Image (spheres, rainbow, N blue to C red):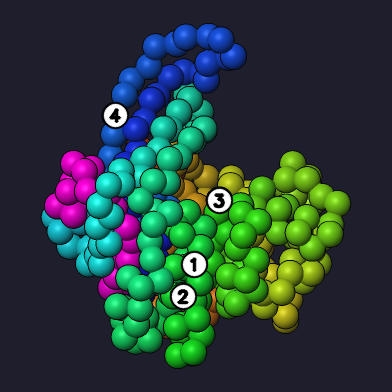
Amino acid sequence: MIVVVGSYNQDLVWRTPRFPKAGETRTGHFSQGPGGKGFNQAMAAHRLGGNALFIAAIGDDALGKHAITLAESVGLRCAWQRCNGSATGNAAIWLNADGQNQILVDLAANTLLSPAHISRHTESIRNARIVLLQQEANAAASLAAMHIAKAAGVRSIVNPAPASEFAAELQALADILSPNESEFAALLQAQGEDITAESIAQRDAGTLHALARKLPCPDTVITLGARGAVLSTPHGFHEFTPPKVSVKDSTGAGDCFNGALAAELAHGSALPDACAFAVVAASCKVERAGAALAMPSRADITARFG
């Protein structure tokens, strides 16, 4: 079983050929659907046969009720904390013609996820093969889940997204860190490195490996968008090149990677093999519009890439 502790947001999506400039008004096409890093990752793991349990907080509003109904309809097991007086998290997402996105999030109820709610699911965490966390939910709750996992010897993945100065303890306890370029730069900056997110993509795999060894986590996999990913371990590094795809929507691609990574590790794959599979899964996702409901199944991946 995989336990995902994280966020649920309702995604409010605007599609436009190009992003508005400052002060400019543009027309576009609107849609909405379920999202949030935690829910996206749980859906990816679930679709890939990971037997996922999602632990999260929602508000006492229509969006929260919709989240419960939706999860039940797709068969994803959830342990919801209903937060009276709070809205459910939501995100405004802009997508341009190249499939690139800009996102603004109101975390709302996600910030209220409590250690007490986590403790109610201690046995599920102890019995998990993998615990997957991000940094969109209340840090104290995420840390409580991590301590339960560590005490039980459960392998953990921390996706350090979005970057947060309050998550150093969570990151230090992780077995695997999975940052993208900007998050990797933020982790290195916290270690005193003078480096920018823009420069990460220009570094070769060996250099990225050397930089990753400066972090406290034993295994770090850096996602690099269209370039794929680089895995750094105490024994060396691996570079994973993605298949060529036509990008339709990059929203949730990193979440797909993390959910696929967790699912493959839970199935018993070695870390390099799990990373290779996660790169292919994320490549399949970017050809599909949407976030949580666009996560591919194993059949989808096989049909697309063989």
Q: Which amino acid lies under the numbered mark 2 shown in the image of this protein?
A: Ala
According to the picture, the residue beneath numbered tag 2 turns out to be 144
Is 164 in front, or is 300? 164
Quadrant holding the N terminus? bottom left
Q: CA distance from mark 4 to mark 2?
A: 35 Å
Q: Is residue 82 left or right of residue 287?
A: left
Secondary-structure class at tag 1? helix
Q: Amino acid at mark 1?
A: Ala
* Foreground label between 4 and 2: 2
| Marks 3 and 1, the one that precedes in the sequence | 1
Pick whichever of labels 3 and 2 is earlier in the sequence.
Answer: 2
Q: Is residue 183 left or right of residue 62?
A: right
N-term-proximal mark, 4 vs 3:
4
Tell me the element at label 3: loop
What residue is shown with label 4? 31
Q: Label 3, label 1: how many angstroms apart (C-alpha)? A: 16 Å
- Identified by mark 3, the residue type is Pro
**Residue nearest the observer in this picture, 210 or 276:** 210
Residue at mark 2 to residue at mark 1: CA–CA distance: 6 Å
